[in-house]
Amino acid sequence: MTLTEENKEFIKTHLVDRRGTDNEKWDGQRAEFGTDGLLPMWIADMEFSTPQPIKDALIARVNSGVFGYPLVPKGYYDALANWMQTRHNTEVKAEWVRFDVGVVNALYRMVAWLTKPGEPVVIMQPVYYPFMKAIENQGRVVVSADLVQNDSGWHIDFDALEKAFARPDVHVTILCSPHNPVGRIWTATELAQVLALADKYQVLVISDEIHQDFEIGGPRFTSTLSIDNGRYQGNLIVLNAASKTFNLASLRNAHIIIPDEARRADYDAFATAHNAVAGTLLGQVATQAGYEHGGPWLTQLIQVIRHNYGELQAAFAAGAPDVRLSALEGTYLSFVDLGAYMKPDAIQPFVQDQCRIAVDYGAWFSPKTATCIRMNLATDPKLVLEAADRVITALHQR
Ligand SMILES: Cc1ncc(COP(=O)(O)O)c(C=O)c1O
């Protein structure tokens, strides 16, 4: 997809040079990679500044000068409900919503609330590695019904999933929808099948839908909340946020959506007992403004990500045709397999020392995807081309 004049204007007005601005992606590489100055294609945040209406709302709130204990206003819940309804055809009632300071924080909290130490939690690897950490760091056990890859892409292994759900000690699963890192937007049919299986074996589904707004190519996103007209809501908790959508991760505001009344009461008792934190005032101000006014900005951003993915595909097709890219349906993270060119052990020295690129390594998501790297495409198209060029040139030098 070629960039339109509007896309170019969007890039010109929103692209920021983040070097030296105390951010992890550019300035915090030494802690993760032992070196600085890598081309940063890792971590899921962007080089684009947040929509102007969000900045305006934050500035207005800061200028009020008063930061006492806040209330979440009705307008916030209306904005969230309206966004979910108009973009995703999904109802979210205000009374279903609880807050946390991040989706990962919420994941930890869900595991602590819903399982006991030693209990298994089912996930589908390769998957966003904090899923494993939320389970294992709290003394629970990962059971993976691994995704499978064939010529048509990544798929859920429903036999493996049913086998895992059928275990008498399994009560909870965490779903990643859209899926990081493989980039799938699960279809309504696939999601209905997962939810029906969970229902059959009385396994509670926690669905991390933080990437819901990135419909890059492929099916539209369907929230698990609206599958079969909400039939599975009793057995479901959805985690989402505006933080990926509008590049707000540091403002720390995320939703825990619990449609079932009894389960919500149970969560409230757990949260009270553990004095759980809620979101943050400025995170909520930004989220509300984004849901109210951020749509046009997001449209531009998605077109730029689509363009970047097309450029990455074209560069590899021309220069290193055996590099295998997962289809980018959802998320802005491309999962790139270098396995045709090298063994797992060679990946890190190749990417880090030869190409001088910072990526999220496939091995972080599953031991079985150790020849993959995850590249962040929500950035300057020039950086995407530079990264592709470095990989292709280094492959030719091997
Ligand atoms: C699937 C998924 N969940 C959660 C997060 C992070 O959420 P938060 O920053 O709200 O903790 C990410 C970030 O990349 C993600 O990909």
Image: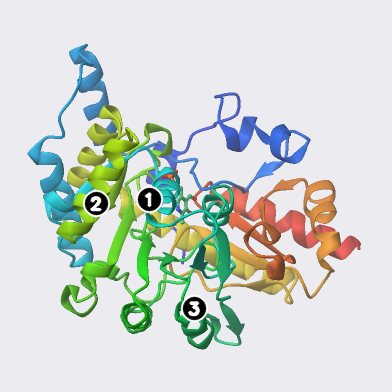
Residue that carries the numbered disc 1 in the rendered image: 113
Query: Could you say whether the residue bearing mark 2 is in a helix, strand or loop?
Result: helix
Give the amino acid type for the residue marked by disc 3 in the picture: Arg
Which residue is disc 3 drawn over? Answer: 167
Q: How many marks overall?
A: 3
At x 53% / y 58%, what residue is drawn?
333
Q: Amino acid at mark 1?
A: Trp
Q: Residue at x 49, y 34 (%)?
A: 16
**Mark 1 Cα shell of 10 Å, populated few (<14), some (14-19), many (≥20):** some
Report, in whole angstroms, how far the alpha carbon at label 1 lies from the one at label 3. 20 Å
Whole-number angstrom distance, CA of label 2 to CA of label 1: 9 Å
Up the image or down, 106 lies above or below 230; here it is above
CA gap between label 2 and label 3 equals 24 Å
**Horizontal relation, residue 226 to residue 238: left or right:** left
Choose the circle earlier in sequence order: 1 or 3. Answer: 1
Q: Earlier in the sequence, mark 2 or mark 3?
A: 3
Question: Which residue lies under the disc numbered 2?
Answer: 266
Camera-side residue of 249 and 298: 249
Locate the C terminus by quadrant: bottom right
Q: Are marks 2 and 1 in contact (CB under 8 Å)?
A: yes
Mark 3 residue element = loop
Residue 182 is situated, as x and y percent measured from the top left of the image, at 54, 68
Please, which residue is most extreme toward the top here? 65
For image coordinates 57% across by 56% down, the residue present is 132
Considering every residue shown, the one lying at the far right of the view is: 398
Left or right: 272 with respect to 203? left
Question: Would you identify the image quadrant in which residue 118 lies?
Answer: bottom right
